Amino acid sequence: MSVSIKLNYFCALLQNSIFMSLDFLQWIGYVASVIIVLSMMMPSIIKFRWINLVGALLFSIYGFLIHAIPVGVLNGIIVLVDVYYLAQIYSKKETFEILEINAGSEYLKRFLKFHDARIQQYCPGFCYTPDENTISFFILRNMAVAGFFLAHRSKDTVLNVDLDYVLPEYKDFKNGKYIYFQLKDKFIAAGFTRVVAEGNNKRYFNYLKKLGFTEVALGVFQKEL
């Protein structure tokens, strides 16, 4: 059997298979549509790009399978655009700094009030009550406020995290890596030997685990400095 005959036989078999049925192709289109819609709901630009890439890739495949070439080509281009911007995001060098803030700062009060609804979602019952052991600062990325860190000293050498809030558009773990890795020497110089964080939110738990924290009790995580 010649190569061309084998190829034609394979194509005919593929077209007649259940995986190439109309229902299956329609489901590819439906799933791609849902993924695209979900991507539009992502507050994080990185999540948007990744999810949009998956949706566009499925739409491109769908377009070519139903012989809608413009649909396949257009979404293929969108995939390339998403890949380009993701490469830009991951390769971009950013300048991180901290801005220590006075406990009575009016801007801090307004910041916490403005973001309170989102803060309460993953830190229920949070209330800003600073004292002499409070450590607080804004995280700046290229001089833009990207988050707020609040903690207090306990047992002389323990840094207890009260709030590690990151603005939605900056949720890419870079803030956390900066705090717990690049600021490590600063914390050690201040006399801290470990960091303790508590919560009841699975997303926060996953965040801590990715940053090297270990769960030592139910909802309690610890990281040695």
Image: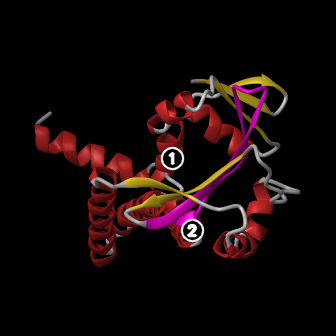
Q: Quadrant of the N terminus?
A: top left
Label 1 and label 2: CA atoms lie apart by 14 Å
Asked whether the viewer can see residue 22, the reply is no
- Residue at (84%, 59%) from the top-left corner? 127
> Residue at label 1?
173
**Amino acid type, residue under disc 1 in the picture:** Phe
Question: Percent from the top left, x then y, of residue 72?
Answer: 31, 69
Nearer-N-terminus badge (1/2):
2
Report the span colored magenta: 144-169
> Which circle marks residue 43 in the picture?
2
Q: Amino acid at mark 2?
A: Pro
Q: Is residue 153 visible?
A: yes
Q: Which mark is residue 147?
A: none
Quadrant housing the C terminus: top right
Residue 114 occupies quadrant? bottom right
Judge from the rendering whether residue 183 lies leftward or rightward of residue 11; answer left or right.
right
Question: Crowding near pointer 1: few (<14 within 10 Å), some, many (20+)?
Answer: few
Q: Nearer the viewer, residue 59 or 68?
A: 59
Q: What residue sits 33% from the left and 55% below the top?
A: 94
x 49%, y 52%: residue: 172
Q: Is residue 77 magenta?
A: no
Q: Is residue 176 left or right of residue 65?
A: right
The residue shown at (54%, 36%) is 180
